[in-house]
Amino acid sequence: MNIQTVVILDFGGQYNQLIARRIRECNVYCELLHYDTDIDKIKSLNPIGIVFTGGPDSVFEDNAPKPDERIYKMGIPVLGICYGEQLIVHQLGGKVMRASKSEYGNAILTADNSHRLFEGVSNTSECWMSHNNQAEILPKGFVAIGHTDTCANAAIANDEQKIYGVQFHPEVNHTKEGTQILKNFLINICGARADWKMSKYAQEYTDRLKNKIGDQKVLCALSGGVDSSVAAMLLSGAVGNNLTCIFVDHGLLRKNEGDEVEEFFKNKHHINLIRVNAQDRFLNKLKGVTDPETKRKIIGEEFIRVFEEQADNIGEVDYLVQGTIYPDVIESGLGKSAVIKSHHNVGGLPKNIKFKEIIEPLRSLFKDEVRKLGLELGMPENLVFRQPFPGPGLAVRVIGEITKSKLDVLREADAIFREEVALAGLDKSINQYFAILTDMRSVGVMGDERTYENTLALRAVYH
């Protein structure tokens, strides 16, 4: 695919994935790389622009993370954000100092909106600051194009070298016109075509899969979650009946979820789907187990065993499909950065399945892009926007020992909760909401009688 790419160099800031998402939302493809990625690797991506993220360090410390200074001589536009701006100033001969007043929170930015970085941006607007240090003396060739009451160099520019910096965070919602600022950098300065769209991705990736796979066999572990479902739909469009999906119903799904998955994939789209009803098998393995981590390990291990058994019945396959998405890759560790979590898809692969290659069609996509792709592929909104759900399912939402009766109660409660949230029109604005069956009992009243029943907890998480 002929894709224009923006490279984001990660310096350990808390908003780094958010920067990437905002750039993608501007219909420009980007990749998040560790700050000390080899410059030849960066050049190989032929980037149209480079973004330095924020970070927790001070640029004048001995071990402060810094990029290869040859980046500034590549002739490619650079935008530094927060710590990224300070890096530009420090490495190019300016001076960064401890701010007389640290800033954390809203500030009023006064911007030179005649400059193309601030085209269409108000002369004064709210921005989000988070820093202890700031640029005091700018390098030769740089000018200030934005300031706040306490930060004279809140935005800087060197138009000749196409190097820019902002002390604030344009990627967060608190910066009211931040998306416009990022878009100006991408379009006005980098010359982006803004053609990174899921309709184009779906068509081009489907064509690639057709050419690559031909009439070979493909196997997909279909959990029923958004990622694996979208991956299955994409592969189905490319290889048709050469795709087989194995859906392990472990009895820990939400109400009607197994039937909905089977109806959509097998009955409506005629995809080769093997549904394995293994509820009793999983419940027997979980009997008497109360520790959450032990539950997870038992479920994960048993899932692999069931998958292996079904795969053996199918015979040899050429490709295995995984629903790995971009945050899985990022959170597995960028270069030398800390590993947030191990790559859960790769970590649990069945060892006795023979295949030529793993296909990860969603590996470069964020979750919101996966959802958009699902809509492009004709999936209904109730599947595409279904609530995130952990692999161990309701097992991690039942505190204490798991029994069928507890699962049935929780299934009903969770369904009622989700229905009420949807009826209130909040299902798209709340990130995640679910019910938990606690291991406590409480006195209540039902009708005219006193009851002593299990206590349910309801949780809703906003951004």
Image (spheres, rainbow, N blue to C red):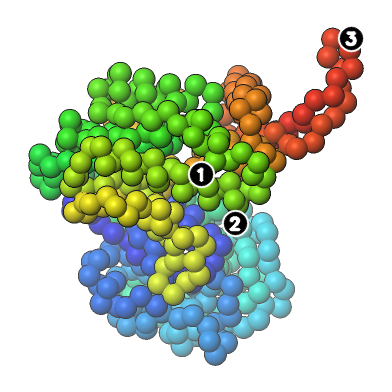
First along the sequence among labels 3 and 1: 1
Horizontal arrangement in the rendering, residue 417 relative to residue 234 (left or right): right
User: Residue 448 shows which numbered tag?
Assistant: 3
Q: Amino acid at mark 2?
A: Cys
Q: Amino acid at mark 1?
A: Ile
Disc 1 designates what residue? 299
C-alpha separation, residue under disc 3 versus residue under disc 1 = 42 Å
In this view, 165 is above or below 306: below
Horizontal arrangement in the rendering, residue 284 relative to residue 80 (left or right): right
Q: Are marks 3 and 2 in contact (CB under 8 Å)?
A: no
Which of the two marks, 1 or 2, is nearer to us in this view? 1
First along the sequence among labels 1 and 2: 2
| Pick the front one: 96 or 27 | 27
Q: Residue at coordinates 67% horizontally, 77% vertically from top-left?
A: 99
C-alpha separation, residue under disc 1 versus residue under disc 2 = 46 Å
User: How many labels were placed on the picture?
Assistant: 3
First along the sequence among labels 3 and 2: 2
Which of the two marks, 3 or 2, is nearer to us in this view? 3
Disc 2 designates what residue? 127
Secondary structure of the residue carrying numbered label 2: strand
Q: Position of residue 393 (x, y in %)?
A: 54, 38
Q: Seen from this angle, which residue lies furthest top?
A: 448
Question: Can residue 362 be seen here?
Answer: no
Pointer 2: residues within 10 angstroms few (<14), some, or many (20+)?
many
Pointer 1: residues within 10 angstroms few (<14), some, or many (20+)?
many
Q: Amino acid at mark 3?
A: Asp
